[in-house]
Amino acid sequence: MRINRQELLAVLQNIEPALAVKPIIEELTFVWFTGTHVYAYNDVIGIVAPLQTEFTGSMTGSLILALLEKSRAKEIEVLPGDNNEVLIKAANARLNLAYYGMDRSIWDVPKFDHNRSFLITESFTKAIGNVMVSVGADTSIPDQLGVTLIPADNVLYMFTTDSKSLSRAMIPFTCDFKNRIILPAIFCEELLRLCKKGGRIQLCDDHVLAVNEDGVMLYSRLIETPRPLEFHSTVDGILSQLKTRDLVPIPNRFKLAIERVSIVLKAHLGEAACFQINKNILQMKADTSLGSIKDSMRLEGDHEDIEMHVDPSLIKRALSECDDFYLFPSCAILSSENFVHLVSAS
C-alpha cells in the first residue's frame, strides 16, 4: 500500500492524544486501520478519523509518527513483514513495526446516532472552555476530574471545582437528555481542539461521542461519582451573600495588577496576597523573602470595606472572561453574563 506521507501524518497527529503512553495493555499504544478509518484508544478516550487504506490492522503509534515526522519522503509504502511485523518504506528508510490484526483490537468503535445528538455551538464550546479553569486533580473526588453537566428547564449548567475555586457556566439547552453526567477533562480538552468549527455531540448514559465537520469522532466513558457534589446549593449560598449589593466592574488596571502580584509570588506557589478595600480603593499587597509589592486602584462601583487573603493565581485564571466582581473575607466572586467563578480565601 502506498500513501501520501503528509496526509497520513496529519491524520495520525489528529488521533495521537488517544494513544496510551505507558499502558499495561500493549494494544493501547497502537493505531488501528480499518480500511475506511484509523483510530486510537487509550482506555479513557478514543479518536476515529476517516482514512481510506488498502492496509488493515495495527502498528505502534509512537514509532510510525516519529518516522513520518522525521522523513521527507512524498509517499510511504506499507508492506507485510515477517513474524507479525509490518514493513514501512519511506524513501531510503526501512522500519519494521509490530503488527496486530483487527481481531486484537480491544475497543469496539461505537456508532454515532445523529438523531440523538445536538449541535456543538460556539456558546457550548465557550462555556466548556470557561469552566475548565477550575478542573481539579484529586482522584478521590470524581467530580473534580471533569466538567459536570446538569440539564434543567431549557438550560444546561456546567460546573467544575478543584476545591480552591468553583466555576459555573450556563447556556440555552433544549435537548431531551436529562441526566446529570461528568465529562472527563481530557475529553473536554480534545473537544475544544477538534470541534473549534462546530460539530455534533451525543450524550449517553455511560459514554459521550462528538463528531466534527471533518468526520473525526471523539469518544469517552463518563466519570461516575457515588456522592455528587451539591454544586447548585454551594453557588447559590455564596451568591446569596450579595443580598442587595451589586457586583462592581473590574477595573482595567486589575488584570495587570494581578499579574504583577503573581510575579512576586511565583516562587511561592499557593501563597496568598492581601486584598484590602477601603472607601472604594482596592489595594493589593504581597510580601515574600524575595520581594514585595503594593498596588492600588479606585473602584468604579460601591464596595464595602473588607480585607481578604487569597492566592491571586486563582483569580487570574478566569479574569479574562469576567466583567464584574465582589470580594468577601471568605470568598471572591467573579462574573459575566453566563459565567461565575468563585475563589475561596486562603
Image (tube, grey):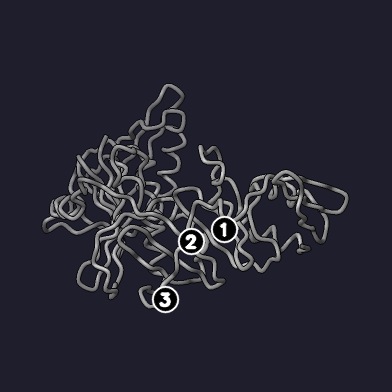
Q: CA distance from mark 1 to mark 3?
A: 20 Å
Residue 156, compared with residue 206, is above or below; it is below
Q: Residues within 10 Å of mark 2 (few under 14, many from 20)?
A: some
Going 38% across and 61% down the picture, which residue do you hit? 208
- Residue 91 position, x and y percent, is 86, 54
**Mark 3 = which residue?**
114
Q: Earlier in the sequence, mark 3 or mark 2?
A: 2
Q: Which mark is residue 109?
A: 2
Amino acid type, mark 2: Val
Image position of 292 with respect to 336: above or below: above
Residue pushed farthest left? 243
Q: Nearer the viewer, residue 126 or 290?
A: 126
Pointer 1 residue: 39
* Residue 299 can be seen, yes or no: no
Query: What kind of residue is marked 3?
Result: His
Dot 1 or dot 3, earlier in sequence:
1
Q: Tell me which corner region of the image, top left, top right, bottom left or bottom right, holds residue 165.
A: top left
> Which residue type carries mark 1?
Tyr
Q: Where residue 307 sits in the image (x, y, percent)?
A: 22, 38
Along the viewing direction, whichever of 327 and 97 lies nearer the viewer? 97
* Distance between the alpha carbons at the discs numbered 1 and 2: 9 Å
Q: In the rendered view, does 331 fall on the left or right side of 261?
A: left
| Discs 3/2, front | 2
Secondary structure beneath label 2: loop
Residue contact at pointers 1 and 2, CB within 8 angstroms: yes
Residues at marks 1 and 3 touching, judged by CB atoms closer than 8 Å: no
Between the residue at mark 3 and the residue at mark 2, the CA separation in whole angstroms equals 16 Å
Query: Badge 1: how crowded within 10 Å, few (<14), some, or many (20+)?
Result: many
Q: Residues within 10 Å of mark 3 (few under 14, many from 20)?
A: few
The residue lying at 67 percent from left, 48 percent from top is 99
Q: Secondary structure at mark 3?
A: helix
